[in-house]
Image (cartoon, rainbow, N blue to C red):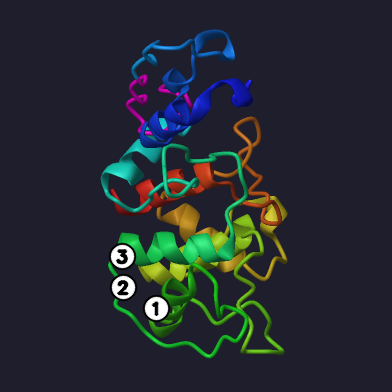
Amino acid sequence: AMDHLGLGWMSWNILSHFTVGAYPAGGLLGAGATPPPPEPLPDTGFWDVGEGHVFGADIAWLARAEVTRGCNAPWNDEFCPDDPLTRGEMAALLVRALGLPPGEAPFTDTAGSGFESDIAALFAAGITRGCDTSDPTRFCPDDSVTRGEMAVFLVRALDLPPAASMFTDAAGSVFETEIGALAAAGVTNGCDPSNAARFCPDDPVTRGQMAAFLRRSLD
């Protein structure tokens, strides 16, 4: 259908940020026809986060606070709430949320990353030490953040005191005290509404979940 639309429609559609309402009915735009007006975004600010989304209010709060800009630059009208959060994305969220100043870091694997400056600021603030205890020059910016790792990032960022964990699946975890600190501060209630004893420390944290964690931490 794209071959039949012509450059005029392409130009209009690019300017409209590829919104749902930009696409002509039936996929064809006749000669002299006027494209439909773009549909307004949901109140959450993102096409893929409906107002009934479980993390909709948290994501909307994050956007209003200018902590997130979405996941599909340059349009930034999607949030990708179910995608795993990467370590680079975590750095950007924390730097914006906390207003951290620029810094320097020893990491060699962040060169050219879109998050290089955020990662350096996070290191300078003492919130990260990298991803490999045997190699302090690695940050692993594209790796997913586990829920246990998320606990460490937030505990350091918020300077929370250690606490015993009530979660049975965190016992023996290297992140046990950080997970306990996060629960004691009211930032997490676990990972399973039907079983309050589970935290799922090894599961990746999604972008939607991280919005909730940040809102509880900062709002």
Q: Is residue 216 left or right of residue 182?
A: left
The three-letter amino acid code for the residue at tag 3 is Leu
Q: Is residue 184 left or right of residue 176?
A: left
Residue 149 image-quadrant placement: bottom right
Query: Does residue 216 sit above or below 96 in this rendering?
Result: above
Indicate which disc, 3 or 1, sits on the residue closer to the N terminus. Answer: 3
Residue positioned 29% across, 51% down in the render:
66
Residue 158 drawn at (x, y percent): 37, 66
Indicate which disc, 1 or 2, sits on the residue closer to the N terminus. Answer: 2
The three-letter amino acid code for the residue at tag 1 is Ala
Q: Which residue is mark 2?
A: 100
Q: Nearer the viewer, residue 139 or 200?
A: 139
Residue positioned 48% across, 31% down in the render:
7
The count of marks equals: 3
- Specify the segment rendered in magenta: 38-54
Query: Does residue 175 sit above or below 200 in this rendering?
Result: below
Q: Are marks 2 and 3 in contact (CB under 8 Å)?
A: yes
How many angstroms separate mark 3 from mark 1 (CA)? 11 Å
Q: Which residue is mark 1?
A: 121
Q: Is residue 23 left or right of residue 169?
A: left
Query: Does residue 43 sit above or below 204 in this rendering?
Result: above
Q: Is residue 96 left or right of residue 175?
A: left
Query: Does residue 124 sit above or below 165 in this rendering?
Result: below
Task: Say what secondary structure mark 1 lies in.
Answer: helix
Q: Residues within 10 Å of mark 3 (few under 14, many from 20)?
A: few
The three-letter amino acid code for the residue at tag 2 is Leu
* Mark sitting on residue 90: none
Task: Say what secondary structure mark 3 lies in.
Answer: helix
Q: Which residue is mark 3?
A: 98
How many angstroms separate mark 2 from mark 3 (CA)? 5 Å
